Image (cartoon, grey):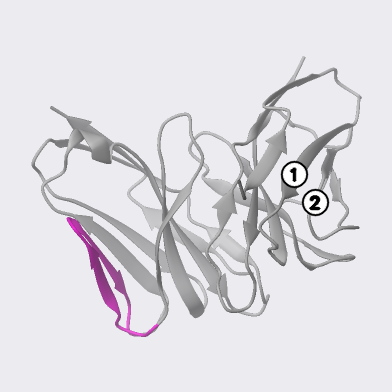
Amino acid sequence: DGGITQSPKYLFRKEGQNVTLSCEQNLNHDAMYWYRQDPGQGLRLIYYSQIVNDFQKGDIAEGYSVSREKKESFPLTVTSAQKNPTAFYLCASVPGRRSTEAFFGQGTRLTVV
Amino acid sequence: GQQVMQIPQYQHVQEGEDFTTYCNSSTTLSNIQWYKQRPGGHPVFLIQLVKSGEVKKQKRLTFQFGEAKKNSSLHITATQTTDVGTYFCAGMGGTSYGKLTFGQGTILTVHP
């Protein structure tokens, strides 16, 4: 089945630790996105990538880092510099210039303990 | 930067009543999209509008894109309990190509 997979579904992290969230898609989509969702604040864009080896900061990039070494993969690292990392993280992919419909993964719920 | 504002944040309706959510962008958009997120789930694409003044319908849902391509609305006629969820608009355009910005969402509750 084609789709976009995020792992793990739930993640617990101690304060001061970096953690990497996985996002893989086999849809052959060009663009990939990371969003953070907090109650009452909708989806806020962290980073996005239109093409391999290139990515742009979104609206709340501080404390996060990404890489796009392969078309299929767009991992997100939540660093210790992120002041309030507990949230629901959603990864999405978009086919490309002709179609901008976003397909979302199931999300990763990160809790800092 | 591009901002997309959505109102209202919450809407409670009785089953059978109509519902409307509104979306406004600070910049002209190349397109506007609408998504629905069920409780505990992830956003699912509903529709995309591209043309100025465009109106599209999906059964009881009517979507509009403003003439200036800076605002949009989603109207649901005769809501049902299955309509419960959060409705998001998302805009792509402005000066940052490929940046897909979501509104804050409208949480719809339908009372039977």
Q: Which residues are magenta?
A: B51-67
Task: Give the percent coordinates (x, y) of residue A84.
Answer: 74, 31
Q: Please give left or right for residue A69 compared with residue A99 in the image.
A: right
Residue A83 sits in which quadrant?
A: top right
User: Would you say A11 lies left or right of B87 here?
Assistant: right
Q: Left of A89 or right of it: where is A54?
A: right
Given the image, what chain letter belongs to the residue carrying mark 1? A
User: Which residue type carries mark 1?
Assistant: Cys
Q: Does mark 1 fall on the same chain as mark 2? A: yes
Residue to which mark 1 is pinned: A23
Q: In this view of the protein, can residue A59 be seen by the observer?
A: no
Percent x, y of residue A32 = 71, 58
- Most foreground residue, B36 or B107: B36
**Where A105 falls versus B92 (above or below)?**
above
Amino acid identity at mark 2: Phe
Q: Quadrant of residue A103?
A: bottom right
| B32 vs A4, nearest the viewer | A4
> Is there CB contact under 8 Å for labels 2 and 1?
yes
Q: Residue at x 50, y 72 (%)?
A: B26
Upstream in the sequence, badge 2 or badge 1? 1
Residue under pointer 2 = A74
Q: Is residue B64 magenta-colored? A: yes
- Dot 2: chain letter: A
Q: Residues within 10 Å of mark 2 (few under 14, many from 20)?
A: many
